[in-house]
Image (cartoon, helix red, strand yellow):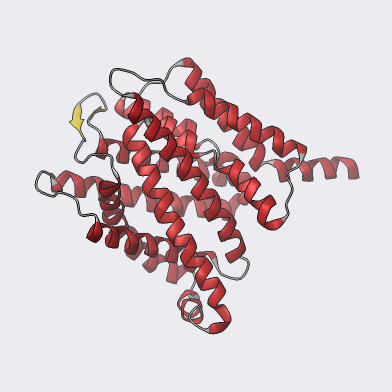
Amino acid sequence: MLGILTVLLSSFVLAFHNVTVRVLFSEHLVLSFFLLGGYVKPDLQNSFLLMFMRMLLVVPLMASLAFKLYPSAFKELRELFTRQYRNILIQALICGVLMFVYVTLLYVAIGLITTGIATTLFFIYPVFTALLSWKFFGQRPTFFRWLVMGIILVGCVLVIPQSSGSHSNHTIVVGIVASISAGIVYAFYNVIAQKCLEKFHPVPFTWISFASTLLLSGVSLLFWPVSTTQIDWTPLWIGSIFSGLVSFVGHILNNLGIRMIGATTASIIGSSSPALTAIVAWATISETLNLIQIMGIGVVTFGIALLSGESFFQSFKIRRTGE
């Protein structure tokens, strides 16, 4: 029970991270009392800026904790630069680049369209992960997986927002494309990470991904600098630090939950992320969805839960057959 609550809390905390990013990009009445946000425009340059500010906190925090949890991490990092581990180093660095790309796209999406919708469309990634695993690992999807992927796609279609007075068609299209693109890039990240983690421990691997994101966002700001004359730095730093802390705590709680109840059960519970994000956004910044969009989020959540729990259902079926 404690493990289930830990993973649920992780999803809840990470939902706050998504809402924080939304507020930094767009002005909202927070908790119906405080008018906050809209400190930067939702574009690529400002996504680089927010990512850089967030990673400035997360990378050192993760390093200090990671090397305590896994003392051999530093040794494994040094071994990556030997010829024997060169392929693993390349795979880890590619994953770092992919993390930078999908986080950038997701930030842009959250800044342009409703938080719950952006998160739900991002969760199209299990469909592309299954297709890429078929392509690169020969893991042909079962009929059950094809069915579940269809369910997820139907849910994604239902949540697509319509044009309104506050959002133009162009803004909505860019937000939708950014969300789905982020999901596709994350699918590539998952597939390459799966291959890399066969020979490399997840603790130093995760740190490399975060450190690469910090480096790439900093380099991107050198080539595409933001206009700093009209930026209110104090609330932006406060929001970025809060975002970094919340993200860090969310990942730690998720990893603790996986250790308690296993990856499969944790994935099933983690499938509640789109729904939790929509609920947190509604409760904190009064973002609303229509009935069809709420149904779409429910369908996607149900589909992800089914896909995550496929191995659980198979083992249960085997046990029943054995009896």
Residue sitting at x 48%, y 21%: 293
Residue sitting at x 50%, y 43%: 183
User: Quarter of the image containing the N terminus?
Assistant: top right
Image check: 42 left or right of 304?
A: left
- Quick one: 186 or 211, which is closer to the camera? 186
Image check: 29 left or right of 70?
A: left
| Whole-percent x, y for residue 122 in the image | 48, 39
| Whole-percent x, y for residue 213 in the image | 37, 59
| Whole-percent x, y for residue 212 in the image | 39, 64
Residue sitting at x 59%, y 31%: 153
Q: In this view, does 89 lie above or below 310?
A: below
Q: Is residue 176 visible?
A: yes
Image check: 213 left or right of 206?
A: left
Residue sitting at x 44%, y 17%: 290
- Quick one: 159 or 21, which is closer to the camera? 159
Q: In this view, does 140 lie above or below 302?
A: below
Q: In this view, does 276 lie above or below 223?
A: above
Q: Where on the picture, by quarter, is residue 281? A: top left
